[in-house]
Amino acid sequence: MRTANVLMGKKNKLVSAAQIGLLSVLFLLYFFPFMFVVVNSFKSTKEFLTNPIAIPLKLEFSNYITAFEKMRYTYAFVNSLIITVLSVALIAICSAMTAHVFVRKKWKINTYMFFIMVASMIIPFQAIMIPLVKIYGSIGMLNNKWALIYMYIGFGAPLAVFIYHGFLKSIPLELEEAAMIDGCSKLQIFFKIVFPLLKPTTMTIVILDMLWIWNDFLLPSLVLINPINRTLPLSTFYFFGTYTVDYGLLMAGLMMTMIPVIVVYLFLQKHIIKGVMQGSIK
């Protein structure tokens, strides 16, 4: 019996060591590209070509200053911020209200409309991007941030409605009936009773949509033509096209594009983990 326990203990230690080794290798594989960009963003092009994986001998902060000016970073950052914040906020609020109507109103048409919205998620964007751009171009809505926000709401709403729909079914109807007896209007019931209860779901949708919209390149490249309206990924793309041989400068521009997303993710990661966990429980 004692010998069996000793063998079992050794086997568990070997399994733990193998798991730690595998996780360490995966961590290095994921982390190396990021560190490669960070280290080389402080190098001159000559130093980068000499040894791209070495620690920089001298920190070239001028790469960041030059990239900030050449990318028109302030304009690009503000454009990305406006488009992302308004799109995500409208997707969350409109989708929650739509899902609430689908769940609470037992109209037959709601069933068909819900399934049509869910079915729209399987249509690939590439299948509709050319007709979409032609139609919006024919009515003069291209090169406009508000048209882009409107498109993001249309593309993001089906998934958000689908997720909200599942969570709303778990909220007792008696809560809303009690609020109605106390004199709340329908909007007050939604914003004071229902919407706060959807906070974990809302945080999950906000983070997923925020990462998607902030990093999206394809749709802004089709809609936003004027350089003054470019988002951060668009500015980075054109910056790369102009300075293809100045590697230190390119790495600095890439870092400046990644920093806002990393900062936001670090602040909000606990909310998405909490939202996913509550979703799995329900």
Image: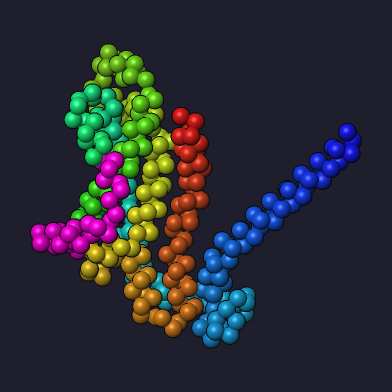
At 26% from the left and 45% from the top, the residue drawn is 120
The main secondary structure of the magenta stretch is helix
Give the left or right position of residue 57, taking residue 123 as reference: right
Q: Quadrant of the N terminus?
A: top right
Question: What is the x, y in percent for residue 147?
Answer: 20, 55
Q: Is residue 18 above or below residue 112?
A: below
Question: What is the x, y in percent for residue 205?
Answer: 38, 43
Residue 204, quarter of picture = top left
Q: Nearer the viewer, residue 159 or 78?
A: 159
Question: What is the x, y in percent for residue 34?
Answer: 54, 65
Q: Residue furthest left?
A: 139
Query: In this figure, what is the number of numbered marks?
Result: 0
Q: Residue furthest right?
A: 2
- Rendered image coloring scheme: rainbow
Q: Is residue 90 visible?
A: no
At 45% from the left and 77% from the top, the residue drawn is 249
At 55% from the left and 81% from the top, the residue drawn is 48
Q: Which residues are magenta?
A: 117-144
Residue 125 colored magenta? yes
Residue 96, quarter of picture = top left
Residue 198 colored magenta? no
Q: Nearer the viewer, residue 29 or 174?
A: 29
Residue 224, quarter of picture = bottom left
Question: What is the x, y in percent for residue 220?
Answer: 28, 62
At 47% from the left and 42% from the top, the residue drawn is 272
Q: Is residue 166 visible?
A: yes
Give the left or right position of residue 103, taking residue 69 as reference: left
